[in-house]
């Protein structure tokens, strides 16, 4: 399952956007959004998210 962002916890820092090797994360209205078609389930975003707003389903 692809990564999922909790919009209530996301602080919009864009760290995940910069670190995602699959370029699967973009920002939408200041909140990270994961494209499930591009997500390789590497969990890099989960590990580096400073607000712990990203998890794997």
Image: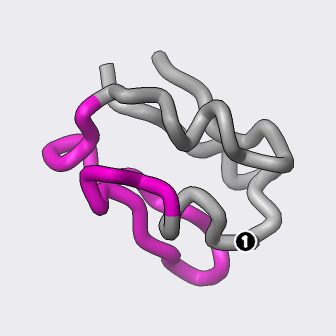
Nearer to me, 41 or 7: 41
Is 8 rendered above or below residue 28? Answer: above
Is 52 rendered above or below residue 43? Answer: below
On the image, the x and y values in percent for residue 49 come to 72, 46
On the image, the x and y values in percent for residue 55 come to 60, 27
* Chain part drawn in magenta: 19-40
Reply yes or no: does residue 24 show up in magenta.
Answer: yes
The local crowd at label 1, few if under 14, some if 14 to 19, many if 20 or more residues have their Cα within 10 Å, is: some
- Which residue lies most toward the bottom here? 29
On the image, the x and y values in percent for residue 32 come to 56, 63
Q: Residue at x 51, y 68 (%)?
A: 18
Q: Is residue 27 left or right of residue 47?
A: left
Q: Is residue 17 left or right of residue 42?
A: right
**Numbered-mark total:** 1
Q: Residue at x 46, y 59 (%)?
A: 33
Q: How is the image coloured?
A: one colour
Quadrant of the image containing the N terminus: top left
Nearer to me, 21 or 38: 21
Q: Is residue 37 left or right of residue 23?
A: left
Q: Residue at x 84, y 47 (%)?
A: 51
> Which residue position is annotated with label 1?
12
Q: Secondary structure at mark 1?
A: loop
Is 49 rendered above or below residue 14? Answer: above
On the image, the x and y values in percent for residue 13 come to 74, 71
């Amino acid at each position: 399952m692809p990564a999922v962002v909790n919009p209530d916890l996301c602080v919009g820092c864009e760290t995940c956007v910069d670190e995602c090797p699959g370029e699967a994360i973009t920002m939408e209205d200041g909140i990270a959004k994961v494209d499930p078609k591009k997500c390789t389930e590497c969990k890099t975003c989960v590990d580096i998210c400073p607000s712990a707003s990203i998890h794997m389903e």
